Image (spheres, rainbow, N blue to C red):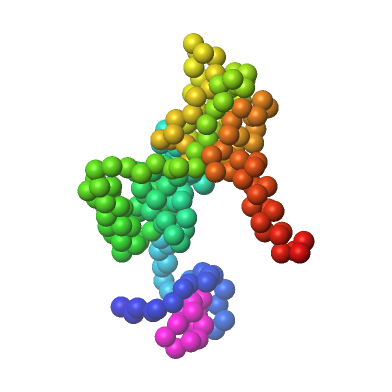
Amino acid sequence: MRFIRGRAASVTDFPLNDREVGKLVVRVEDTLIGEVRRIPLDMVVLATGLSPAEDAARMARTFHISCGDGFFMERHPKLAPVSTATDGIYIAGACQGPKDIPDTVAQASAAASLVQSLMSKGEIEVESATSVVDAEKCAGCRICNTLCSLSAISFDEEKKISVINDVLCKGCGTCAAACPSAAIIARHFTDEQLFAEMEGALYDVRA
């Protein structure tokens, strides 16, 4: 038995000499010696492919997390590799994509540590930069209800206005930008605040 550290490039049945006749030829990069080798073999067994679960898209909609190509997506590949767009829901292992055992164990340990940190605090911090609906301006068009990917906006049938749940809202500003009545205000990102930041940034330029 021979172990070669490298990555296989191709498998062909085209012989270059008598030694390769009647055999499958694997072209592989041997990283230990820094050369590309051609190895004739009697049989080649390929790794089994991994496909996502059939109900992955439904699960993503249920928990309001991102899903791409059937696999769940993390909030940030570097800064939050096991966190999702929904607080308190973490991913680990092959649900995020094809992974080997060491990577899966490392992700599972990271997810368990984050869950333990939430439980030990006893309190959950919510996003401060959320959006709020001005009841006097809201026309009840429900456009914001359909656009919110986190289902943070509900409709009050009695008052005929939309209501934003501060716990679920992440302050993305999609609803505020799409509201035709300008009834939704994004906290800490109002027009007055944005104009003040622009004036401050351009102050030295004017001078």
Q: Measured along the vertical axis of the image, is residue 2 above or below residue 181?
A: below
Q: Measured along the vertical axis of the image, is residue 206 above or below residue 146?
A: below
Q: Residue furthest right?
A: 206
Q: Position of residue 173 (x, y in %)?
A: 58, 39
At 28% from the left and 42% from the top, the residue drawn is 123
User: Can residue 146 be seen in this snapshot?
Assistant: no
At 54% from the left and 14% from the top, the residue drawn is 160
Q: Nearer the viewer, residue 114 or 122?
A: 122
Q: Measured along the vertical axis of the image, is residue 98 above or below residue 135?
A: below
Relative placement, left or right, of 178 versus 15 is right
Q: Quadrant of the N terminus?
A: bottom left
Q: Position of residue 143 (x, y in %)?
A: 61, 25
Q: Measured along the vertical axis of the image, is residue 58 above or below residue 36?
A: above
Residue 33 in the magenta stretch? The answer is: yes
Q: Residue furthest bottom?
A: 33
Residue 89: image quadrant is top left
Q: Which residues are magenta?
A: 25-39
Q: Residue furthest left?
A: 120
Which is the main secondary structure of the residues drawn in magenta?
strand
At 30% from the left and 52% from the top, the residue drawn is 114
User: Can residue 113 be seen in this snapshot?
Assistant: yes
Q: Quadrant of the C terminus?
A: bottom right
Residue 183 in the magenta stretch? The answer is: no
Q: Position of residue 121 (x, y in %)?
A: 25, 47
Q: Nearer the viewer, residue 15 or 99?
A: 99
Relative placement, left or right, of 46 versus 21 is left
Q: Position of residue 165 (x, y in %)?
A: 44, 30
Q: Nearer the viewer, residue 114 or 6?
A: 114
Relative placement, left or right, of 111 versus 139 is left
